[in-house]
Amino acid sequence: MVDLTATTDEHAKNDNKGAKETTMLRLTRKLYTHESVEAAYKREDKPVNWKEILKGCSCSKICSFLLKFVPIITEVQKPYIKDCVVNDLIAGLSVAFMHLPQALGFGVLASLQPVNGLYTTFFPLICYIIFGTSPHISFGTTAIVSMMTSSVVEREEAVYWNTLNISSNMSINDPAIQDQLMAYKVQVSMTLCFVVGVILTVVGILRLGFVSTYLSESFIGGFTFACAIYIATSQLSKALNISVGIVSGPGRLLRYYIILFSKIHEGNWADFLIAVFTGFIILAVNIGVNQRFRDRMKIPVPIDLIVVVLATLISKLGSFEYNLGVDIVGDVKSGVPAPQLPDLSGYMFTRVVADSFLIAVVIFTATISMAKLCAQIHGNTIDDNQEAFAYGVTNIVASLFMCFPASQAHPRTMMLSTLKVKSTLSGVSSALLVLILLLGAGPLFAHLPIAVLAAMIIVAMKDLFALIRVLPYYWRVSKSDFLIWVLTACVSLATDLEIGIYFGVSFSILTVMFHSCPQWAKGYLLARAKDEDLYLDKSSRVGLEDVHGVKIFTFDSKLYFATAEIFRKDLYEQVYTPVKLEIVEPEKGQELAILPPIQGETIHHIIIDCSHITYIDITGINILRQLVVDYRHMGTEIFLTKVPPFTVTALANSNFFDVLPMDSIFFDVNDAVQHARVYTQPQPATP
């Protein structure tokens, strides 16, 4: 082994004109093979300590493990909780002013009743306080999940309607039929919520939180934009007070607009004016006040709640329902519903299980991404798996109380982040205000015009519509992300959200496969920078020089059945082909001769940089073994460098090192180059 030890010298050189300093760094160390590194820096194999394992199974350890699933117990014991609890409760009260109108509106958006939105706000809030870890996540109703729930509920409503034995003189608008259909839709939403909860709970328990990383940002953006179109569209009929009926299945967006415009003459001008005026007021305050002066305002103006209260009062005083024919919310039930099990019969379960997986993915992805963003802003830590468990248990409990699937909403979460809450206790005051509304104040909103809620929902989609502005950036940076975004949105709009999700995920996977396609694998030569031991791509840079008699080859892909021939072909093209020639001599039989390179320098060593070969299969091993043998017949030895641990293990298990000894496996390219130089130098004669 050659010792390359020297001193470390770091200095700066300045030219006479005062140019920028150039730092020179001289590194020294011993020459290492793979074996010598393993010998010098041995891996520590810790034996199994059964005593420690059994000790960890004590009752106290088991209780500590179980308590990790209920973080509120340890949260309230932290010393800072006394200092932040008042601020957190006040912040929760501020966010509650956003919860109330959104709960009413998103209950309607989910094709249920406003009170179901209140239930889906109250119970998830309580549960997330107990099981959640992010102080900034505001769990409850959200537009996208409400829209996806509506898609399932309306589809099942159409199926259920076709199974009813309805007399010819009764229509879908009959109050008795409406009550029957609503009861069925609530049952569908409860089952959907339960299955979503079970899926997320399993993800948390099995520590599968990493699955969210497989959903690309471009797919989520395109799908979210399509959801915004669906959400706004669904509210047009309510803003115009037009009964469109049940529209579900592929192409429902187009069919919805056809029905809507065919009945446009049936619309109520009063509802339309209320919706327009409401939208204008909310936009004016949000843009002109809340956004413009957000740095000076601790709490934004709760314009949504103010509009709801004023609209309810004006509607009641003016008897809009009777005088103008305005559609109103109607009776909002008081009290908290008794728990009841969802319908888990085989029929209902099989009808919603596929939708539940999609909704669970959307809930987890949207919520965990916001939790991580807020954690990054405030320096907190988030446990992906505990968060998934919290989302799951929250939805399971909520499903017992006539709720639909719950998730976080960006505006509420960002408001909690702005108010710098430090614990999940902010949900206590939010839940308390919702509970007051449920216990007695609900009927006060009976005269609230539906058009007001419709306008609020449409205006809330403003930021989601703005997602389309990322397309020029995607086009410049990544054409594949651009296509995923556009095609996911277009397919979702042309068919249905469910089909759009399947298509978007499938197309995302196809793009990954395309970029991982073996045809993109490439091998190329490295050369040494002049006057320093730095090895770079020879074909794309200047100022490099070859090491005499040595070729350094690298391959930027895994070496398996699909890339093995590409590896061999590129190596032959970049170095030389060990040509085989059969010579037949009758007396000796058939022999095999290998011709040396016809032109160019004599190559005594080929160094293969294996840093990208993180996986190798039987085909790759066989190709590598054959190359070693063929080039050795030519007088050229092969060295391997920077071999990943998995690849080393695979080579060892295949007896590859019977052909190429372990001392030909080097730690780094420079180690292999220096050894090749010494290897070819004439050795002094032995006296």
Image (cartoon, grey):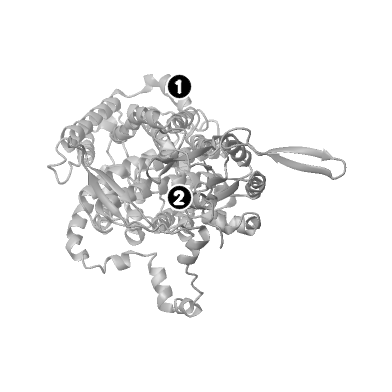
The relative height of residue 8 versus residue 623 in the rendered view (above or below) is: below
Q: How many marks do you count on the picture?
A: 2
Q: Mark 1 — residue?
A: 258
Q: Nearer the viewer, residue 503 or 395?
A: 503
Q: Amino acid at mark 1?
A: Ile
Q: Secondary structure beneath disc 1?
A: helix
Q: Mark 2 — residue?
A: 670
For the C terminus, the quadrant is bottom right
The relative height of residue 90 versus residue 309 in the rendered view (above or below) is: below
Taking the spot 18% from the left edge, 54% from the top edge, the residue there is 90
Q: Nearer the viewer, mark 1 or mark 2?
A: 2
Residue lying at the far right of the rendered structure: 587
Image location of residue 116, percent across then percent down: 37, 47
| Left or right for 406, reference 547 | left
Q: Residues within 10 Å of mark 1 (few under 14, many from 20)?
A: few
Quick check: marks 1 and 2 in contact, CB under 8 Å? no
* Residue 318 visible within the image: no
Question: From mark 1 to mark 2, how far is it between C-alphas?
Answer: 71 Å
Q: Residues within 10 Å of mark 2 (few under 14, many from 20)?
A: some
Q: Earlier in the sequence, mark 1 or mark 2?
A: 1
Q: Amino acid at mark 2?
A: Asn
Q: Nearer the viewer, residue 644 or 666?
A: 666
The relative height of residue 49 versus residue 544 in the rendered view (above or below) is: below
* Residue 487 visible within the image: yes
Residue lying at the far front of the rendered structure: 687
Image location of residue 379, percent across then percent down: 26, 55
Q: Secondary structure beneath disc 2?
A: helix
Image location of residue 678, percent across then percent down: 50, 52
Residue lying at the far left of the rendered structure: 296
Image location of residue 342, percent across then percent down: 49, 53
